[in-house]
Image: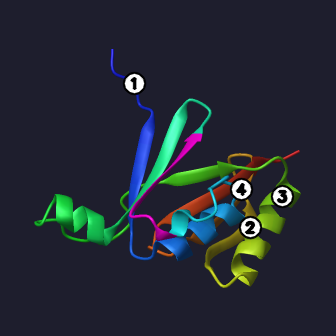
Amino acid sequence: MARFEYAGMVVKDMATTLAFYRLLGLDIPEGAETEDHVEVALTGFRVAWDTETLITQIDPAWKKPVGQGIGIGFLCDSPAEVNDLYQRVTEAGYEGYKAPWDAFWGQRYAVVTDPDGNHIDLFAPLG
């Protein structure tokens, strides 16, 4: 039986993208910025990034997508961590898409934008 265990993203600038995801807590090896493909193993799952250059070598017909094509979320330990992480990301120069708010479904929620335009959700249960 097949199992979902990998998600990959195509990135314009590997160094900028990896710096963003390090802010969110991913343990990405130093020096990976110079690679065209980077993977990080999480608990039972992998996330990977490929440069646009590599993807167009593999698939010359590839076209950069328009709009939000994938949802990515980071569970925080507390509502305060959502606030703090949103602030750290935006103070580092990345775009805040939606400032932290208390969502009606019972979570503290915020959305930031990664360097390639993907919306990244930050959330934690309220109370």
Element on which disc 1 rests? loop
Does residue 81 appear to the left or right of 38 in the view shown?
right
Mark toward the viewer: 2 or 4: 4
* Amino acid at the residue labelled 3: Glu
* Amino acid at the residue labelled 1: Arg
Q: CA distance from mark 1 to mark 3?
A: 31 Å
> Residue at horizontal 50%, vertical 41%?
46
Q: Are marks 3 and 2 in contact (CB under 8 Å)?
A: no
Which image quadrant for residue 96? bottom right
Outermost residue toward the left in this view: 61
Give the overall secondary structure of the magenta segment.
Answer: strand
Q: Can you see residue 65?
A: no
> Residue at horizontal 66%, vertical 53%?
26
* Amino acid at the residue labelled 2: Pro
Which residue was labeled with disc 4? 25
Q: Can you see residue 82?
A: yes
Q: Are marks 1 and 3 in contact (CB under 8 Å)?
A: no
Count neighbours of disc 3 (C-alpha within 10 A) and say few if under 14, some if 14 to 19, many if 20 or more.
some
Element on which disc 4 rests? loop
Q: Which one is in front, 33 or 76?
A: 33
Q: CA distance from mark 1 to mark 2?
A: 33 Å
Element on which disc 3 rests? helix
Which residue was labeled with disc 1? 3
Closer to the chain start, of discs 1 and 3, is 1
Which residue was labeled with disc 2? 100
Residue 88 colored in magenta in the image: no
Residue 37 colored in magenta in the image: yes
Q: CA distance from mark 4 to mark 3?
A: 12 Å
Which residue was labeled with disc 3? 81
Highlighted magenta segment, given as a residue range: 34-41
Q: Is residue 22 above or below residue 105?
A: below
